[in-house]
């Protein structure tokens, strides 16, 4: 299989890029793929904590690109999956400590070893963003159903296009079906009407994300988690499977029923 | 929609749902966002315009203004180019030759 470099980006901060990278990376590893996740949010390292790997860090991405250590030494192996790795961000440097050129070389080197290279992008459209997209084939744009987030996503889609990346795909995160039903939140269709991009998946607002982040165990590991289920389906779509997008009804009836069964298992 | 929500909407002053408001506001900001060009880009246009016009007219380069204007959804590149003088020799060359 040809390896793919996917950048997870959004423009706006706090919409779920890191959550998405951790869950998608873990889900792809669960499917038997060799995966590395790169945290490019230099100065605001976070992906390690979401994955529960913060105690294992010795070197970071800046050490690797500057040759202070070998690439292999910088990679941290996941607790649960043999073929899942993290390259953490540096915490004490700033975004200019890495250049787009270095990022491109790094991702190219990783292509030799991995099926998927997931790049967790920082917020903003400055150098951190340019670094993150430098070696990427395609982008996954994350947006929440809010005016500011969709607006930023639109801007990012334009920039990705200008940078010559492949076809970007959208994840709508933190959708609240109750609010959609009473007309107080934009729904999938409203957002898709606005953004010129294909939909990769919809992740509901879900407390299990908070719980799993508390524990440092991505929600995809939890069979009963709705958000985790959404990310597992997203991973299958990334692998090229056709998996229908979850709508309100399937969520309420089928998923509820499934969850009841899962609890009984 | 739940009955209470419906009643709430009927009796409140504002009966459009907040998502409709969000969509409309988003539509408007995006019309603007998608159709603005960066100052750097505008400067490139300006410099190239200058290069061409300089050949024909003496212009006040400091006072030159180039802007992208939009009304509803139509756009126009509006340039205000103050002319300081005429390039007599150049004009004579071109106009003279066309007269003969
Ligand atoms: N689907 C979700 N449901 C509930 N909370 C979420 C969801 N997605 C993200 N969050 C929470 O939102 C916050 C920001 O998410 P994060 O992934 O760190 O965003 P980013 O990397 O884009 O800044 C975190 O506290 C995270 O736990
Ligand atoms: Mg983040």
Image (spheres, coloured by chain):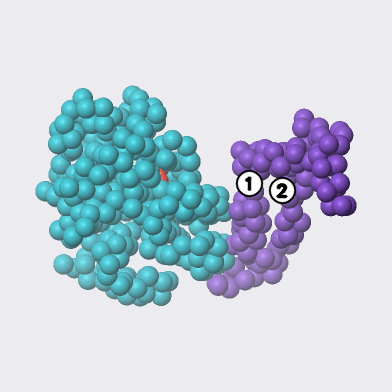
Residue identifier under label 1 = B37
| Mark 2 Cβ and ligand 1 under 8 Å apart | no
Residue A224 location, quadrant:
bottom left
Q: Image point 21% across, 48% down: which residue?
A: A111
Image quarter (top left, top right, bottom left or bottom right) of the N terminus of chain B? bottom right
Residue B23 location, quadrant:
bottom right
As displayed, is residue A88 above or below residue B12? above
Label located before the other in sequence (1 or 2): 1
As displayed, is residue B35 above or below residue B87? below
Side of A26 where A39 appears, left or right = right
**Neighbours of disc 1 within 10 Å: few (<14), some (14-19), many (20+):** few
The answer to whether any part of residue B61 appears in the image is yes
Residue identifier under label 2 = B68
Side of A187 where B99 appears, left or right = right
Tell me, yes or no, whether dots 1 and 2 are on the same chain.
Answer: yes
As displayed, is residue A171 above or below residue A245? above
Q: Image point 60% across, 53% down: which residue?
A: B34
The answer to whether any part of residue A179 appears in the image is no
Query: CA–CA distance between discs 1 and 2?
Result: 8 Å
In the image, farthest residue toward the left: A82
Q: Badge 1 sits on which subunit?
A: B
* Coordinates of residue A84 in the picture (x, y in percent): 17, 48
* Coordinates of residue A69 in the picture (x, y in percent): 18, 28
Element carrying mark 2: strand
Q: Which chain is cyan?
A: A
Q: Which chain is purple?
A: B
């Amino acid at each position: 299989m040809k390896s793919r470099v996917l950048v997870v980006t959004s423009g706006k901060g706090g919409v779920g890029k890191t959550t998405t990278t951790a869950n998608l990376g873990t889900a792809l590893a669960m499917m038997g793929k060799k995966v590395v996740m790169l945290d490019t949010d230099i100065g605001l390292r976070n992906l390690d904590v979401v994955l529960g790997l913060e105690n294992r860090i010795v070197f970071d991405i800046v050490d690797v690109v500057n040759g202070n250590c070998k690439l292999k030494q910088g990679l941290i192996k996941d607790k649960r999956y043999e073929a899942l790795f993290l390259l953490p961000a540096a915490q004490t440097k700033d975004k200019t400590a890495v250049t787009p050129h270095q990022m491109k070389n790094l991702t190219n080197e990783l292509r030799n070893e991995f099926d998927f290279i997931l790049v967790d992008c920082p917020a903003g459209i400055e150098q951190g963003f340019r670094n993150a997209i430098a070696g990427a084939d395609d982008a996954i744009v994350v947006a929440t159903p809010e005016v500011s987030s969709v607006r930023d996503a639109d801007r990012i889609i334009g920039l990705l296009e200008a940078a010559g990346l492949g076809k970007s795909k959208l994840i709508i995160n933190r959708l609240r079906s109750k609010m959609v039903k009473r007309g107080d939140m934009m729904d999938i269709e409203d957002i898709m009407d606005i953004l010129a991009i294909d939909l990769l998946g919809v992740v509901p607002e879900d407390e299990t994300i908070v719980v799993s982040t508390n524990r440092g165990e991505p929600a995809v590991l939890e069979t009963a988690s709705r958000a985790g289920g959404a990310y597992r389906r997203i991973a299958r779509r990334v692998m090229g499977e056709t998996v229908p997008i979850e709508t309100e009804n399937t969520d309420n009836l089928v998923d509820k029923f499934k969850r009841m069964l899962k609890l009984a298992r | 929609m739940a009955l209470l929500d419906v009643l709430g909407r009927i009796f409140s002053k504002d009966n459009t749902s907040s998502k409709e408001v969000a969509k409309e506001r988003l539509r408007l900001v995006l019309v603007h966002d998608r159709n603005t060009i960066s100052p750097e880009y505008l400067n490139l246009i300006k410099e190239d315009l200058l290069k061409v016009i300089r050949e024909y007219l003496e212009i006040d380069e400091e006072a030159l203004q180039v802007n992208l204007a939009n009304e509803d959804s139509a756009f126009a590149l509006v340039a205000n180019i103050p002319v300081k003088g005429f390039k007599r020799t150049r004009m004579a060359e071109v106009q003279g030759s066309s007269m003969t």
